[in-house]
Amino acid sequence: MIHCYTTPGEISDPSNLAEVGTFCREMGRDANQGEIGLVIGDEYFAIRDFAEE
């Protein structure tokens, strides 16, 4: 489990979101996971497609 904090401005930046997405997909592939869960605020995002973009 990775737990981190950020500011609303940082997480709203499209390039930062793209980097988080890339990291989550890479972690899912490398750890052979079925799903990576990402919580932003109170919203849960399930990442199941780990294909490289």
Image (cartoon, rainbow, N blue to C red):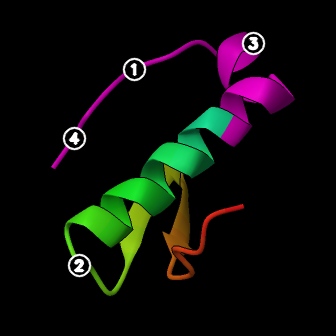
Left or right, residue 25 beside residue 37: right
The residue range painted magenta reads: 1-18
Q: What residue is disc 2 on?
A: 32
Q: Secondary structure at mark 1?
A: loop
Left or right, residue 7 beside residue 36: right
Q: What residue is disc 4 on?
A: 2
Residue 22 place in picture, x, y as percent: 57, 48
Identified at 59% across, 12% down, the residue is 7
- Residue 5's label in the rendered image is 1
Q: Secondary structure at mark 4?
A: loop
Q: What separation in Å lies between label 3 and label 1 (alpha carbons)?
A: 12 Å
Q: What separation in Å lies between label 4 and label 1 (alpha carbons)?
A: 10 Å
Q: What residue is disc 3 on?
A: 9
Location of the C terminus by quadrant is bottom right
Q: Nearer the viewer, residue 16 or 29?
A: 29
User: How would you rate the neighbour count of disc 2 (Cα within 10 Å): few for under 14, some for 14-19, many for 20 or more?
Assistant: few
Mark closest to the chain's N terminus, 1 or 2: 1
Q: Are marks 1 and 2 in contact (CB under 8 Å)?
A: no
